[in-house]
Image (tube, rainbow, N blue to C red):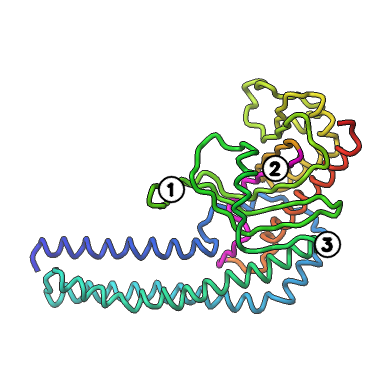
Amino acid sequence: MTALDEIWLVILILAAVIVITITVFISIKSVGLTKKRHNHLKIKKNKISDEFKEMYEYIVHTYAKELEENRKKLLKSLMVCIILFLITTSIVILIFDKLNIDLNKRSGWYIFLLYLPTIFYYTHEYKKYNDTYRKNYKMKVIKNFVEHINPSLTYTPTGAKWLLDYYLDAKFDEESFNKFVTDDYIVGRNKDGSSIEISDIALENVNEKGEFLKLFYAGIFSVSKINKDLPNEVRIKKNKNLFYGKSQNQVEMDSNEFEKYFDVFSDSNILSMELLTHDIMQLIVEFYKNYKINFEIVLKENNIYIRFDTGAMFEPNILKKSSDMRTLWIYYSVLKFVTSFTIKMNKVVNDADI
C-alpha cells in the first residue's frame, strides 16, 4: 500500500466515522437525548400537590413496567449499533493494513458490504424499538397525564399547522423563520368553559432544498380565549433591561416584586393595571421563581398567547425512566399554569368594566 493509498484509507474511515456519528446523533435526538430542553436542576424543591401524586401513581402502576422494558430494548439496540460499527471499522483497518489492498472503486464496495450489517440493524431493529418507545410514551404517559389534569382536554402526538396564524398574530419574534414545526397538540376547554390549545413548536430556517440551517426557537406555545375583546394589547416579557431604564410604551406596575422579573408593554396604562391584578402578578412571579422558565404573555383582542422557552417537551429521554417524576412535574406545572392563568384572567375581564 502506497502512502497515497494510506491517506485515502484514513480519509475513507474518517468519513465513515462522521456519517455514523451524525446518524447516531440524529437517532438519539429523536428520543430526547440531545434536544434543547429546560434544565430541571434549576427547579426548587416544591411541595408536590395531591392531584399530581394521584396522576403520577396511576401512570407508574399502569404503564411503567411496559415502558421500562421498551426503553431497555432501545438502549440495548443503540449499544449493538455502536459495537457493530466499532467491530466493522477495526476489520476494515486490519484488512487494508495486513493485506495491502489498494483503495479503489472495487475495494470501496467491499467496505460498504462490511458495514451493511450495521446499516441493516440500525434501519430495522433500532428504528423499530425507537418508534415503539416514542409511540408508547406519548400515548400512554403524556395522553393519560393530560386527560387526568382535565378530562375535557384531548391529546394527540401530531401537530396543528393552523397555530402558525396565531403565533404570527402574537408577534413574538424579530428574527425571520421559514419553517414552522408542531407536534404534541392539546385542545379542549378549561373548567370555566374557555377554549384552549397547546402545542410543542419549533421555528426553523431551512434552505431551498428543505435542509435544516438554524433553530430560532423550540418550546410550548398556547392559545386560549378571553370572554371579551380587549381595546389594547398588553404584553408581558421577562425583564432583560434592568440597567437601561424604561422602554417606549412600557407600563410601570405597582409591584416591586413583579417588576424585578417582568416588564409590561401597552398603549394603555389603565387597561394593564385592570388586567394585571395582585393575584395575576403573583401567579406569574411564583411560576417563574419556582421553575426558572422564561415565558412571554400577550393579551390581544380576545386571545391569550403564551410562549414558554422550555425547549422540546413531551419527548422521552432514554437516559431517564419513562416515569421520571421531575420531568412529569414540569409538564404538569406548565399545563396547570396555562389553565390557571386563563381562568383567572377571564374572571378579571368579566369583573372589570372593559
Residue type at mark 1: give it. Answer: Val
In contact (CB < 8 Å): disc 3 and disc 2:
no
Magenta segment, prevailing SS (helix, strand or loop): loop
* Residue underneath mark 3: 51
Is 47 drawn above or below residue 129 in the view shown?
above
Residue at image position (21%, 63%) is 10
Most extreme residue toward the left is 2
Q: Which structural element holds mark 2?
A: strand
Kindly report the distance in space between the C-alpha atoms of the residues bearing marks 1 and 2.
26 Å
Report whether 313 appears left or right of 101. Answer: right
Snapshot quadrant of residue 260: top right
Q: Amino acid at mark 3?
A: Glu
Query: CB atoms at circles 1 and 2 under 8 Å apart?
Result: no
Res 323 quadrant in image? bottom right
Point out which mark residue 206 bears.
1
* Badge 1 or badge 2: first in the primary sequence: 1
Which image quarter is the N terminus in? Answer: bottom left
| Mark 2, other Cα within 10 Å: few <14 / some 14–19 / many ≥20 | many
Marks 3/2: CA distance?
Answer: 26 Å
Q: Which mark is residue 305?
A: 2
Q: Which mark is residue 321?
A: none
The residue shown at (72%, 58%) is 329
**Residue farthest along the right direction in this orientation:** 351
User: Where is 305 relative to 239, above or below?
Assistant: below
What residue is at 53 percent from the left and 56 percent from the top?
35
Question: Secondary structure beneath disc 1?
Answer: strand
Q: Which residues are magenta?
A: 302-319
In this view of the protein, which residue sits in the foreground, 272 or 100?
A: 272
